[in-house]
Amino acid sequence: MSLNFILASESKIRKKILSDAGFVFKSEKPLIDEEALKKKNPKLSPVDLSLFLAKEKALSVSKIFPKDFVIGSDQVCLFGDKILSKPIFKEKAIENLKDLSGEEHHQISGLAIAKENKIIFENHYSATLKMKKLSLKEIEEYVDRDNPLLCSGSYKFESHGKDLFEYIQGDPYVIQGLALEAIKNFFK
């Protein structure tokens, strides 16, 4: 595809998904503080949070590149009524995976497209996953192998993380944090 746009993300996996799909694009770091925005908006539902952050990312880059289409995306892992943030530390990743072991959870991916500093498209997409029942040893070995410290849900689905699941319902790209089919449909 010869369409040009800007991805408001430095995520290697999001860039790879778009490159593998044949898109020509550039990426720019969004000029937002995600953690500060989450703290200022604690009552947002997981869906609303994913959309809010996706829009903020897209708008922050659209201010600099108003003539370009700018794609913002954000992913939220929902376990029961609890959002599992990126673990950052190995101990937290292990704790999150212990919680998810043998259980079902959801990955929600918010998508926003901006142009001329306005949101022209927004939607959310979700996938349901059930993790296999894992021993502590299996969890620790997985964390050492994939180092998923900056990953929603504490796993890298695009790597060895996909082997942790009994089943998934939904788009694997949504699980990886980017609603690729929605982007393809938007630019048709």
Image (tube, rainbow, N blue to C red):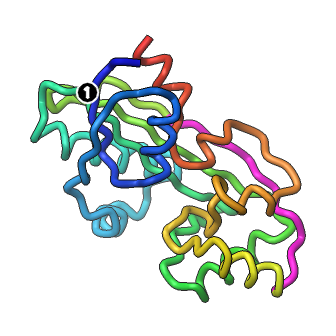
Q: Position of residue 176 (x, y in %)?
A: 58, 49
Tell me which residue sits at (44%, 11%) in the image: 188
Q: Quadrant of the N terminus?
A: top left
Looking at the image, can residue 80 be seen?
A: no
| Residue nearest the viewer, comparing 118 with 86 | 86
Q: Examine the rendered structure and indicate whether residue 135 appears above or below residue 29.
A: below
Q: Examine the rendered structure and indicate whether residue 90 appears above or below residue 47.
A: below
Is 96 contained in the magenta span? no
Q: Name the residue under label 1.
A: 69
Tell me which residue sits at (36%, 64%) in the image: 38
- Residue at the farthest top position: 188
> In which quadrant of the rendered view does residue 181 lie?
top right
Q: Main secondary structure of the magenta part?
A: strand
Going by the image, does 49 lie left or right of 69? Answer: right
Going by the image, does 151 lie left or right of 132? Answer: left
Give the magenta range: 124-136
Is 135 contained in the magenta span? yes
